[in-house]
Amino acid sequence: DLSNSKGYLECDDHLRKIEGGPANRLYYLATAPEFFPIAITYLGENDMTVEEEGFRRVIIEKPYGRDLSSALELTKTVHKHLSEKQIYRIDHYLAKETVQNILVFRFGNTIFEPIWNRNYIDHVQITAAEKVDVGHRGGYYDQSGVLRDMFQNHLLQLLSLVAMEAPASFDADALRNEKVKALSAVRLLSPEEVLDHLVVGQYEGYLDIPEVEDGSRTPTYAALSLYLDNWRWQGVPFYLRSGKGLKEKMTEIVIGFKSPPHVMFPLQVGEQIHPNVISMCIQPDEGIHLRFEAKVPDTQADMRSVDMDFHYKESFGEVMIPEAYERLLMNAINGDAALFTRADGIEAAWRIVDPLLQVCESGRIPTAKYKKGSWGPVEADELMAREGRAWQFGCMHS
Ligand code: BG6
């Protein structure tokens, strides 16, 4: 019983018997979120977090708070009983091999970084689509919705990796400092602006799930446009979307480049040059695609987009890639916090998401309906079309 302090002492005794002497301990709080503060408090009060005989580390599952104020409150409790270096906050997206590769792609090569800015990039799209619906997780999901379940953590973590400056080293704090700076540069939206930048949707049939409240407006889909106010990204929109019950499961990041400044080729009426695109395919098509224009053979200068691609399986063979959770548990055992989020990073993300939640929960924004097996509500396409752009599938349909 997590809410009974005595139980922790019994657990401690039990562990001591198994350990038979000094030992390291990693407590993994894979519990319902309401137990995080209680468990940390009792572990602390029963001296189970004292690092005299070995390390005492705590992994905290998501969700870390349900808004900014509850996240700040949780951090207060955590820091009362543990030092920051004992804490490992999970976001399993950070441990996906393809997500870790974003840093290697950007900072382990010289040819991409010089063009990774507002001078060459027109916009960025980040999509995390899921085919599964809410299923029997209605009780949890109806209280969370897609903004808490996917945007506050996974999508904003992906954004921070795409947008951050190069850290000086691979050290956990050097990395996390740069990620926090990127998230802190995201322009916070006023309620009026939220109405222009956010589309929320709910798939048809969601309300039939038994644990879902009658008439619930909880979004199972959202599309959002954001801007970062800094030198690198000024004026470049970042479009984020995620949803359940969609056509396919796929996560990808599309970097859309600007069009050439001058077209010297004779084009047909209405024809235009397709701008270059780099697609970082997170899952299931793990790899990277680069789209560029090529001359169609035996024509004067007809052009067609072609695709240059890298795939993990082709380049590295069928090696066993550890599951994100395997990687995370191993890293926590080894004391490497680089793939875990720090409290200030989580708070910066809540600062971005809080105004969106407030507008949604006040009922000011309509919840659009969409069919299961579609790509979400048409309103999300309109959000892009208003700015002369469209959602792209750089990995799947190239
Ligand atoms: C979890 C969410 O954090 O991520 C789930 O709570 C979601 O709702 C899952 O399905 C998606 O993870 P992945 O690795 O399958 O993309």
Image (tube, rainbow, N blue to C red):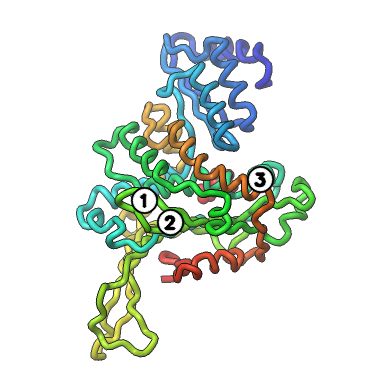
Q: In the rendered view, tell whether residue 231 sits above or below residue 262.
A: above
346 or 101, which is in the foreground?
A: 346
Q: In the rendered view, tell whether residue 97 sits above or below residue 124.
A: above
**Where, by quadrant of the figure, is residue 258 drawn?**
bottom left
Question: How far across and how far down the image is residue 337, in percent?
Answer: 39, 31
Dot 3 amino acid type = Tyr
The response on whether ligand 1 sits within 8 Å of label 3 is yes
**Of label 2 and label 3, which has the lower sequence position?**
3
- Of discs 2 and 3, which sits in the foreground? 2
Q: Residue at x 54, y 47 (%)?
A: 150
The response on whether ligand 1 sits within 8 Å of label 2 is no
- Of discs 2 and 1, which sits in the foreground? 2
**Of label 2 and label 1, which has the lower sequence position?**
1
Q: Write down the residue under mark 2.
A: 238
Q: Give the quadrant of the N terminus.
A: top right
Dot 1 amino acid type = Val
**Where, by quadrant of the figure, is residue 223 drawn?**
bottom right
35 or 71, which is in the foreground?
A: 71
Q: Secondary structure at mark 2?
A: strand
Question: How far across and how far down the image is residue 323, in percent?
Answer: 46, 43
Q: Residue at x 34, y 31 (%)?
A: 173
Q: Can you name the residue that lies furthest to the left here? A: 110
Q: Write down the residue under mark 3.
A: 141
Question: How far across and how far down the image is residue 302, in percent?
Answer: 29, 86
Q: Write down the residue under mark 1.
A: 162
Cα distance in 3D space between marks 1 and 3: 28 Å
Q: Residues within 10 Å of mark 2 (few under 14, many from 20)?
A: many
Q: Residues within 10 Å of mark 1 (few under 14, many from 20)?
A: many
Cα distance in 3D space between marks 2 and 1: 10 Å
Residue 129 is at least partly visible in this image: no
Q: Is residue 380 left or right of residue 83?
A: right
